[in-house]
Amino acid sequence: MRTQVAIIGAGPAGLLLAHLLHLRGIESVVLESQSRKHVEERIRAGVLEQGTVDLLVESGVGERLRREGLTHHGLELRFGRRAHRIDLSGLTGGRALTVYAQQEVVKDLIQARLAAGGTILFEISDVEVRGVGTNAPRVVFRKDGAADAIACDFIAGCDGFHGVSRASVPRGALTAHEQDYPFAWLGILADAPPVSPELIYCQHELGFALFTMRTTRLSRLYLQCAPDEDIANWPDDRIWEKLRARLGGGAPLPEGPVLQKGITGMRSFVVEPMQHGRLFLAGDAAHIVPPTGAKGLNLAVADVRVLAQAFAAHYESGSSAALDRYSETCLRRVWRVQRFSWWMTALLHRFPGGDAMRQRLQHAELDYLVGSRAAMTAFAENYVGLPFED
Ligand code: FAD
Ligand code: PHB
């Protein structure tokens, strides 16, 4: 088999890249280790920045998103028994965020790709990246037990944090920057209407909590927990009790059957550069942000937007200048988003040891934030998403 761009990973990054390349007349093959059902049911992100929504709509895969996505013009911050709304749209000239589940974005992209005659190979194994330092890279893999290979011009490593792409780069060629956090998130999906029509981020002496949603009937709720927490110690009653305590007063928290439960670790990670020879890393394969700013999926989208344009410039004009600048262009945004995600994480979580000094400083910063239009504007600009740069 031969193609122009071999894409490893059918997450949001790989699928959107394949779609954007198709619109520019560039062929690709997507290789995915999991089944189609698995990737279409994997519960993850839910908040799309304005720029992400615009890109999906403009590229023709936003029809269901426009119909079913929930537009949010603000969010609430709770701390010290007080609630403050941040008017995201009012502070950013009308920009907003949209709640639409990541697996729905994935379903829409898979459907568009297959309807256009594109190739996505699911359930492949033993993927290896070969020859990225040459003009003839290849991806070798097994499908239904049989060895196979794809020859290509370029490889896009869109296979997430634990994928093979980044791991295949020779030692020393990439520099990794990493920070772990001394806490994790326990997340549930509940068959219950959201407590509020807008997201609520709670800073609480018992620990952080987040009240978000997937639809007007499905709540997505998160609680700060220990990084080594055993989910077996969290029966549903205990989760609801902690959520109620951290939410504090106001409207009572609607409860319902817990449909899914899981623990997510938190880390900040960036690899530099995001390219090695003819291998280009995008999305979680190149960087991870802690989920507090709701940025991971959006950053993956921003990367592949740049990458698709750079491939198009290469094939249309023969110039490799944009491909050569890919890493530099992306990393500028990656570091800004890392900074925002790290800042929000440090601002809202309880650090082990219950350091009273840190808590006072967090309160002072939150107090300043909600009392200053300038500070709220900076927050809102980052939360709805910084403009794309070329
Ligand atoms: P992935 O989605 O991880 O896709 C990589 C794909 O590659 C997967 O399908 C995987 O199966 C495949 N793969 C891996 N290894 C191989 C291999 N060897 N061969 C072939 N295929 C392989 N982000 C937000 O923007 N907003 C949010 O609200 C948000 N909330 C989150 C909540 C949680 C609980 C979690 C866990 C994440 C959240 N994120 C959020 C982050 C977001 O989900 C990720 O950043 C996003 O999935 C990145 O997309 P990706 O395509 O780069 O990687
Ligand atoms: C979500 O809806 O899953 C979500 C929202 C905001 C975040 C993280 C996750 O910061």
Image: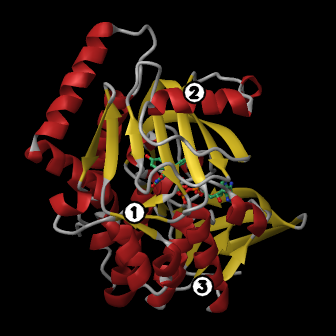
Q: Does the residue labelled 1 lie within 8 Å of ligand 1?
A: yes
Give left or right: position of 352 versus 115.
left
Query: What x and y, as percent, mark residue 235?
Result: 74, 29
Element class at badge 3: helix
Query: x, y percentage for residue 102?
Result: 56, 62
Q: Name the residue under label 2.
A: 242
Q: Is residue 18 above or below residue 191?
A: below
Marker count (numbered): 3
Instruction: Please identify, in this view, whether the residue under mark 3 or under mark 1 is nearer the observer.
Output: 3
Label 3 environment density (alpha carbons within 10 Å; few <14, some 14–19, many ≥20): some
First reached walking from the N terminus: tag 2 or tag 3: 3
At horizontal 40% and vertical 24% (from top left) the residue drawn is 204
Name the residue at the right extreme. Answer: 145
Which residue type carries mark 2? Lys
The CA span between labels 2 and 1 is 37 Å
Q: In which quarter of the image is the C terminus?
A: bottom left
* Residue picked out by circle 1: 303
Query: On screen, 24 above or below 101?
Result: below
Give residue 262's quadrant in the image.
top right
Which tag, 2 or 1, sits closer to the chain's start?
2
Spatial CA distance of label 3 from label 1 is 20 Å
Q: In which quarter of the image is ligand 1?
A: bottom right
Name the foreground residue: 36 vs 274. 36
> Residue shown at 15%/51% (left/top)?
377
In the rendered structure, which amino acid carries the disc numbered 1?
Asp
Mark 3: which amino acid?
Ala
* Left or right, residue 313 beside residue 361: right
Q: Give x and y (percent) for residue 259.
A: 73, 49
Which residue is label 3 attached to?
112
Sequence-wise first label, 3 or 1 = 3
